Every structure is written in C-alpha cells, then in structure tokens.
Amino acid sequence: MNTLLKTIYATSAKMSQIQSLTIKAIKAELTYIESQLIRRK
C-alpha cells in the first residue's frame, strides 16, 4: 500500500511540473502573439 501511495505522489508531482511548464509555454506564446498584434497597429 505504501509503495502505491509513493508512486501516486511521484506521478502527480511530475504531472504538476509538466502542467506548470505547459502553462509557462502558453503564456510565452500569448505574450509573443500580443506583441506581434501591437506592432501591426
């Protein structure tokens, strides 16, 4: 039981790392798009 819990915690920690990286990438992309739109005006 204990090993299973450790595995679940490790997996969820990895998932949250991936999620935060994805969010950072999306934010960077949005910032880039926004700056491109501002330049066109």
Image: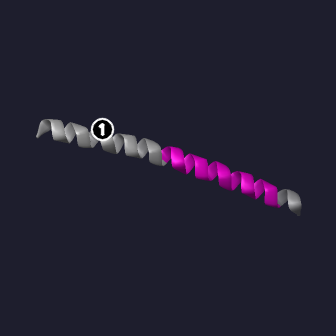
Horizontal and vertical percent for residue 27? Answer: 62, 52
The segment highlighted magenta reads 20-37
Task: Give the left or right position of residue 17, taking residue 28 as reference.
Answer: left
Q: Quadrant of the C terminus?
A: bottom right
Residue lying at 73% horizontally and 51% vertically, measured from the top left? 32
Please name the residue that numbered disc 1 is placed on: 10
Q: How many marks?
A: 1
Looking at this view, name the residue that lies furthest to the left: 1
Left or right of residue 39: residue 2: left
Colouring style: one colour
Question: Pointer 1: residues within 10 angstroms few (<14), some, or many (20+)?
Answer: few
Q: Residue at x 25, y 43 (%)?
A: 8
Q: For residue 7, which quarter of the picture?
A: top left
Residue 1 location (% of width, % of height): 11, 40
Reply yes or no: does residue 21 show up in magenta: yes
Q: Is residue 24 magenta?
A: yes
Specify the amino acid type for callout 1.
Ala
Depth check, front residue: 37 or 4: 4
Q: Quadrant of residue 34?
A: bottom right
Please, what secondary structure does the residue beneath circle 1 have?
Answer: helix
Residue at the extreme right of the image, as rendered: 41
The image quarter in which residue 35 lies: bottom right
Instruction: Give the dominant element type of the magenta stretch: helix, strand or loop.
Output: helix
11 lies above or below 26: above
Q: Residue 38: horizontal and vertical position, in percent?
A: 82, 59
| Image point (46%, 44%), residue name | 18
Which residue: 52% across, 44% down? 21
